[in-house]
Image (cartoon, coloured by chain):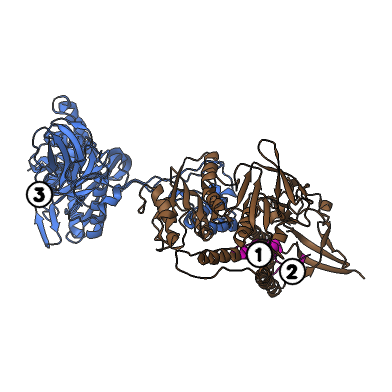
Amino acid sequence: MGTHVIKMPDIGEGIAEVELAQWHVKVGDLVVEDQVLADVMTDKAMVDIPSPVHGKVIALGGQPGEVMAVGSILISIEVEGAGNLKASDQLVKEPAPIKEAAPAVAAPKVEAAPVVESKPAAACRPAPQAPVARDADERPLASPAVRKHALDLGIQLRLVQGSGPAGRILHEDLDAYLAQGTQSARSGSAPSGYAEHHDEEQIPVIGMRRKIAQRMQEATQRAAHFSYVEEIDVTAVEELRAHLNEKHGASRGKLTLLPFLVRALVVALRDFPQINARYDDEAQVITRHGAVHVGVATQSDVGLMVPVVKHAEARSLWDSAAEISRLATAARNGKAARDELSGSTITLTSLGALGGIVSTPVLNLPEVAIVGVNKIVERPMVIKGQIVIRKMMNLSSSFDHRVVDGMDAALFIQAIRGLLEQPASLFIE
Amino acid sequence: MQQSLNTTLLIIGGGPGGYVAAIRAGQLGISTILVEGQALGGTCLNIGCIPSKALIHVAEQFQQTRHHSQGSALGINVSAPTLDIGKSVEWKDGIVDRLTTGVAALLRKHKVQVIHGWARVIDGKTVEIEGADTRIQCEHLLLATGSKSVNLPMLPIGGPIISSTEALAPKALPKRLIVVGGGYIGLELGIAYRKLGAEVSVVEAQERILPAYDAELTQPVLESVKQLGIKLYLKHSVEGFDAATHSLQVRDPNGDSLQLETDQVLVAVGRKPNTQGWNLEALNLEMNGSAIRIDNRCQTSMRNVWAIGDLAGEPMLAHRAMAQGEMVAELIAGQHREFNPTAIAAVCFTDPELVVVGKTPDEAKAAGLDCIVSSFPFAANGRAMTLESKSGFVRVVARRDNHLIVGWQAVGVGVSELSTAFGQSLEMGARLEDIAGTIHAHPTLGEAVQEAALRALGHALHL
């Protein structure tokens, strides 16, 4: 019998640490080759870690939510034969591994090496120990001072949950009970007939959610956001889209409005290279990109993801449409590859029918522009002195004012508007 | 002409319950009158706790000196001691005097009016002082008349038949003493008299001495009693006393009658609430057996009539009465209080001493608790050895599920002082880990407390 250790792989380019998102196995489990052991996460990509060997799991190297250094031991598996455990490898043990499965090599727990996040492990710690339940007739456990204080406050200790050792009621528990009591007393004066709820649930911010939180916070803290909203008459482009779907839908697939928007971005960006750019504010360098890699914000079960339509400038409408559809599905299923989730130069965000009339998108740093699509509605518009019904859609876009001036942003959006209102111009080179 | 007094609080009885209630009431600004027919301090200070401890100390010193005179291992050489019991009693009276004078001073300090005289209850708001033509009207009446020794009809107190009161103030030591009652009072006094030189026998109707405590706990006391040469008549019942032959008639377990010659018989078969002789009947209060029924605020069945201490039944302990008295004063002052201790320590000043706080293993079991019981012997305690006493142990009872300590017991020389630690640990809700994790000074008997907790956790260090 030997021990095979699997280290945290280097999944992305130059990534020093990876978040352990989920275990698919536990200590004592028998695993077979290629069985998925864990999900880990870098940037926004979720990556499966398969088992290269047959064997029994003897130790897990971390807990979900823990940020682990690349190269640190992810899992130890007992295998037939010698295994790959070297004396230099420190084995990471779970706090309470099964006794007989405990490896002969005892070693201190390896902390996830240089970690940027503060207290990464705290996020995955279980919620504070639930108060010990007391039998109805059991004497509440409290010190004489707490008992006296409770009497002074008119609190019946048997109604108070104790958070101390063995369920001991502390002064803090009285305070908490009192705070809760005053709340009910206040609303109690005006009975509504609806019950108050005081339950709380603590959701650790780990994995995807933590990444999103970090990215959003970073974006709003670093970039000087400003938003610009313009309404666009999409009657013509919608007519064109309906026509194309009718004519080619069966053979080439249905078109949504998104490929038209992608095309509009591509064409408009030719005149606004400062907007198809990434701003490295630490190096103080703006990189203008010839390629247009359009990030398409996509909602998945675990949160917001931004798969990237690469080289949109080289794609036809249907090509774009197919790629958007493929990426969206992959992202939603958590199957998007890491490089499919990075490298965008500008981002498009749309909630479709839920798009509302105005939004204030948050930049996908280090990009400098994000174009938000609001819903299409039929509205009475005045054209040449006549009230006519037109399909109208707002574009709500945000820019990084540090490097994009308001005039440029406005001109860029007006260019897109012009292209969409005269859809033929989208295709004139 | 009749004198009429008005007060907020009237307390009948100046024992530990009554005088503490009075002091606390005084502190809280409640106008208070305390009526006491005998001496301030009640049974406890005058004919109970304090004098008995004084006599026990005299006996212990005498016994130690005699021990040295017979060539003790300590290398102390003295000639055989003699005892001037009159002087001993004088010394004891001096302590009692100092304490009762102290109580009087404390009451004065807190502006409590003390009336010496026998109270007679008229109604729930009115009390008369017998022979003084004084009538007192009160808003609150606190009954704290304590308890009396239980008498046996076939052994009326008088002559050679004495109660603990007489036993605590002997004019001369009897050559032979029979103690009727193997409870803590009988044994404390019996052991003291034995050490002072009397031939002592103890007659107990039950099969063990200290029947209120479990056999394991009382075993060291039993051994000590035997070693002191006290004769035990267990499962023997008293039938009477023949003054002509100076003999106590007892019936042995087989039903045969025995004549035990003796000079004195000490009747120590317990105490009963003092409900007679002060017209308590006028209130027609609800009773709980022979005691006044009270709730957890010491309220009787009559509004603003309170009862505390021995009058309100078991456990008849001075410290319980004091705590109740303090509480009642605070309740009368309008504070929210209830009598809700986790435990009330009980101590027997036998040799060795015995202390019980909280639940015993049997009580815990009866309460449906799954408990760990662990003890640590003084035989493994250095301090105990230096005190020439290796008998006894400390025992802890803790819940198995969360290690909450529910009881402490100890038997051994000087363990009465451990009651402080025991009481605190129970009131604070300590777990075994808390006691095991507290550094206990070395060398002290208290180390056995920590070791008992450690042993319960499976890792006693010195065993």
| Res A136 quadrant in image | top right
* Residue type at the position of mark 2: Ser
Mark 1, secondary structure of its residue: helix
Write down the colour of chain A: blue
What residue is pinned by disc 1? B51
Q: Chain B drawn in what color?
A: brown
- Residue on which the image places disc 3: A88
Q: Are marks 2 and 1 in contact (CB under 8 Å)?
A: no
The percent position of residue B199, horizontal first and vertical second, equals: 64, 55
Q: Which residue is mark 2?
A: B31
Which residues, given as a range, are shown in magenta? B29-56
The three-letter code of the residue at mark 3 reads Ser
Q: Secondary structure at mark 3?
A: loop
Please say whether residue B325 is visible from this viewpoint. Answer: yes
The foreground one among B124 and B324 is B324
Chain under numbered label 2: B
Point out the frontmost of discs 2 and 1.
Answer: 1
Percent x, y of residue B190: 63, 55
Q: Label 3 vs label 1: CA separation?
A: 76 Å
* Residue B291 in view (yes/no): no
- Mark 2 and 3 residues: CB-CB less than 8 Å, in contact? no
Residue drawn 74% across the image and 69% down it: B31
Q: Residue at x 14, y 45 (%)?
A: A8
> Which is in the foreground here, disc 3 or disc 1?
1
Q: Secondary structure at mark 2?
A: loop
Q: CA distance from mark 2 to mark 1?
A: 32 Å
Q: Is residue A380 magenta?
A: no
Measuring from the top left, give residue A339's x and y in whole percent.
Answer: 12, 43
